Amino acid sequence: MNFGKRLRLYLTGVLLGCIAVYFLLIYKRDRNFTSWLPSNRIYNEIIEKPFDLNDSTTVKYIKCLSIRLDTALVKNIILSATINFSKSKIHGMEDPIYLLETTNTKEDFNTEIQLTKNHIKIVNINSPNVENCKY
């Protein structure tokens, strides 16, 4: 079998494989191929789970920062943030703690959130405009 015949046979197999993958996995399906990245998976978990804003430490942070915090504002702050995986505490913990760094034009926040099985808990909020609110 000469090189041209082998090349045609190979390209035919690749083409048939691509067509099979397209129709089996992609065609007429609502697929989001970016959701497999780690930060996108965390964002999806944040969107799906409710926030525990009645926790005593969360209330102390809200009072310390002098802001009115509700679930919609928290989700907007977190979704505009970037997850710093190198400073997050995710290894060897049952409920990982992620450090979210938000840089808006109005306010900068470093927020640590803990993802539990049922809800999301704010562990720490730091803002350069206010002294560190650690309790």
Image (cartoon, rainbow, N blue to C red):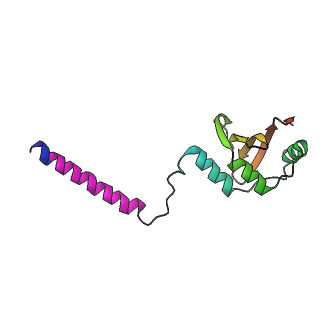
Quarter occupied by the N terminus: top left
Residue 50 in percent (x, y) is at: 73, 56
Residue 38 in percent (x, y) is at: 57, 44
Is 85 one of the magenta-colored residues? no
Quarter occupied by the C terminus: top right
Tally the numbered discs: 0
Most frequent secondary structure within the magenta stretch: helix
> In percent of the image, x 62 and y 53: which residue is there?
44
> In percent of the image, x 52 and y 51: which residue is there?
34
Is 13 one of the magenta-colored residues? yes
Q: Nearer the viewer, residue 6 or 52?
A: 6
**Where are the magenta residues, as a range?**
6-33
Residue furthest out toward the left: 1
In the picture provided, is 36 more to the left or to the right than 111?
Answer: left
Q: Nearer the viewer, residue 127 or 47?
A: 127
> In percent of the image, x 49 and y 59: which residue is there?
31
Q: Is residue 92 above or below residue 28?
A: above
